[in-house]
Image (spheres, helix red, strand yellow):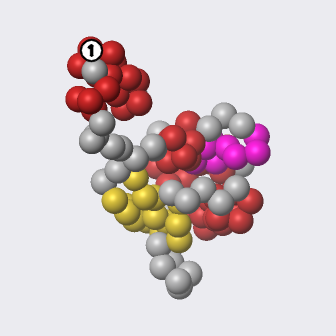
Amino acid sequence: MIALEMNEYKYELGEAAVANMSFEDGSRCLELFESKTVVQPSLFKLIDEEGSIRGNDENLLRKFHQFYLEQNKNPHYKKASKFNSPQFKIWHYAGDVIYDIDGFTEKNKD
């Protein structure tokens, strides 16, 4: 979105008007939520799958770590701590946000 707006500003205001503006590309972060590939399914898809097989939060967190830390290494997904906590961290425009996995599969059944 921001890239499209920057192009519009360049067109309307000229190259010099936007020369000092910069922004972080959030496409890799969006992949965590919107990916439709089998190789790297979205967080939402994994939550839905875990709920449909009567899974649990621990298995869901294990899948998150497997897909986003081990296999595809998305830089926006991190473990919340060095210890085995039931949490994960997503880095986006607002900084690091820690999510507690407890209740994810149950709440998704609604």
Q: Amino acid at mark 1?
A: Glu
Residue 84's place in the image compared with 11, above or below, is below
Front one among 48 and 83: 83
Which residue is at 36% across, 32% downward? 2
Which residue is at 70% across, 46% downward? 40
Query: Is residue 17 shown to the viewer in this render?
Result: yes
- Mark 1 Cα-neighbour bin, 10 Å: few <14, some 14–19, many ≥20: few
Residue 31's place in the image compared with 87, above or below, is above
Residue 110's place in the image compared with 92, above or below, is above
Residue 59: which quarter of the image? bottom right
Q: Which quarter shows the N terminus? A: top left
Give the residues in magenta: 38-46
The residue sitting at the front extreme is 16
Q: Is residue 21 left or right of residue 63?
A: left
Query: Is residue 44 shown to the viewer in this render?
Result: no
Q: Dot 1 corresponds to which residue?
A: 12
